[in-house]
Amino acid sequence: MAEYRPLAADEIDRELFRSFIRRQVVVKCWRRDEAGGWVVRDDPFIDDWSEEDYHALASCLRNTVQTGGVVYAAFVGGVLKGFTSVEAGLFGGEQRYLDLTSIHVSQDMRGGGMGKALFRLARDWARAHGARKLYISAHSAVETQAFYRSLGCVEAEVYHQGHAEAEPFDCQLECPLA
């Protein structure tokens, strides 16, 4: 059984992720076609993090907490197996978005509901902090998109230009919080 709790900034370092397995084997992704619609295309690759990526992640997550956002973690047997983060600071005008900047479950724990539990925590935190919608710049892998769609996410009404430019293959999503 997993234990879920928010992390303090001083808990977030490279060592926290020592047993975390980011690896995702991707075969099919959602891509824009020539007419601007969405289609599934073969785009095989392995998504994994380097040592440098883990250090950058720890720094970003610490910053999230230090600037008023939240990082929730899922632990199994005292070992980090999942996490999610939501930034403080509403954007998007009337959309009143808060940004879900990460949600990851260790490869050895996927498919057991941990991601959904983490998403609910992020959603509830965003609602309690004045958001009308959660914004997600989401990996375009078919299975990742199926996860978000199963939670009620749809294409974002307003795109966050910074996210869209930084990750042009991501799908820009939102989740209404009403």
Image: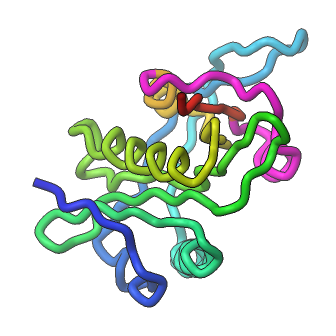
In the picture, measured across the screen, residue 75 lies left or right of residue 124, that is left
Q: Residue at x 78, y 25 (%)?
A: 157
Q: In which quadrant is the C terminus drawn? A: top right
Q: Position of residue 121 (x, y in %)?
A: 39, 49
In the picture, measured across the screen, residue 85 lies left or right of residue 19, that is right
Q: What colouring style does the render use?
A: rainbow
The reply to whether the magenta stretch includes residue 155 is yes
Q: Position of residue 74 (x, y in %)?
A: 28, 60
Q: Position of residue 87 (x, y in %)?
A: 63, 61
Q: In which quadrant is the N terminus drawn? A: bottom left
Residue 122 seen in the current view: yes
Residue extending furthest toward the bottom? 10
Residue 27 seen in the current view: no
Q: Quadrant of residue 171?
A: top right
Q: Is residue 54 above or below residue 36?
A: below
Q: How many marks?
A: 0
Q: Is residue 158 above or below residue 124?
A: above
Q: Residue at x 56, y 26 (%)?
A: 153
The reply to whether the magenta stretch includes residue 126 is no
**Boundaries of the magenta span:** 150-170
Q: Is residue 153 above or below residue 16?
A: above
In the picture, measured across the screen, residue 59 lies left or right of residue 170, that is left
Q: Position of residue 138 (x, y in %)?
A: 62, 40
Q: Residue at x 53, y 44 (%)?
A: 127
Q: Residue at x 62, y 22 (%)?
A: 154
Q: Quadrant of residue 169?
A: top right
